[in-house]
Image (cartoon, rainbow, N blue to C red):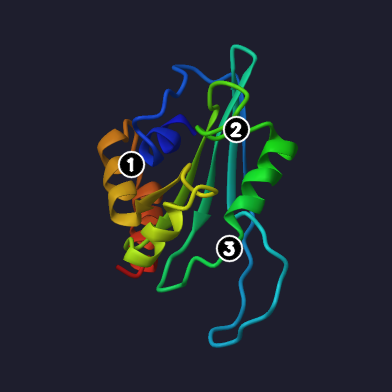
Amino acid sequence: MRLLLKALVPDFAWPETLEEGIIDLEVKCQPAGRRRKSPSRIDMVISAKSNGTRFGAVVEVKTGRQKVINPLPAYTSHVREGYGLWPADCEFGRANAAFVVLVPRASPKLQRRLSHVRNRHWKIVEWPVLLRRLEARILHDSQDFRHFRKAIWDTVDV
């Protein structure tokens, strides 16, 4: 978990050790070509504790040429209330979470959207950058883990 957090946002002040942690993933699959209206949801919330303090990351994941039309300010409010995770622009002191939009490529439109005052705490991370950071930090490897990473590289449309 710490490896993933450091790879997502290396310049965030992540704690050296984690006491406990959870990764909540919201995965919804639908047949290709069919768009189904569904309620908004956060793709990934990583939450951990260190010395009794909560830390985490909120990640909106895109693997293809999908537009980021998600309600990012609503996601921020949801994780503040539900997980106790606060962004860098919070009024209650030090941030304890990183907010990331993980995309194959950063578009100028997405960059403009994240420059809006309500979205400034969201950071763009491109898939190739994240995967290279992960590769550089791996201490223990296995055939299964290599296969998993290859599947991710093959899935991300860059």
Q: Which of the two marks, 1 or 3, is nearer to us in this view?
A: 3
Q: Is residue 27 left or right of residue 142?
A: right
On the image, which quarter does residue 34 sit in?
Answer: bottom right
Q: Earlier in the sequence, mark 2 or mark 3?
A: 3
Mark 1–mark 2 Cα distance, whole angstroms, equals 25 Å
Mark 2–mark 3 Cα distance, whole angstroms, equals 19 Å
At 41% from the left and 54% from the top, the residue drawn is 148
Mark 1–mark 3 Cα distance, whole angstroms, equals 26 Å
Q: Amino acid at mark 1?
A: Leu
Give how far across and how far down residue 144 sits, in percent: 40, 50
Which of 16 and 110 lies nearest the eye of the viewer? 110
Give how far across and how far down residue 87 sits, in percent: 54, 35
Circle 1 SS class:
helix
Which disc number belongs to residue 70?
3
Please tell me whether residue 132 is drawn above or below residue 139 in the rendered image: below
Q: Earlier in the sequence, mark 1 or mark 2?
A: 2
Which of 78 and 38 lies nearest the eye of the viewer? 78
Quarter of the image where the C terminus is located: bottom left
Q: Amino acid at mark 2?
A: Trp
Give how far across and how far down residue 7 sits, in percent: 36, 38
Which disc number belongs to residue 15?
none
Mark 1, residues whose alpha carbon is within 10 Å: few (<14), some, or many (≥20)?
A: some
At 52% from the left and 34% from the top, the residue drawn is 89
Please tell me whether residue 76 is drawn above or below residue 152 in the rendered image: above
Mark 2, residues whose alpha carbon is within 10 Å: few (<14), some, or many (≥20)?
A: many
On the image, which quarter does residue 69 sit in?
Answer: bottom right
Q: Earlier in the sequence, mark 1 or mark 3?
A: 3
Circle 2 SS class:
loop
Q: Amino acid at mark 3?
A: Asn
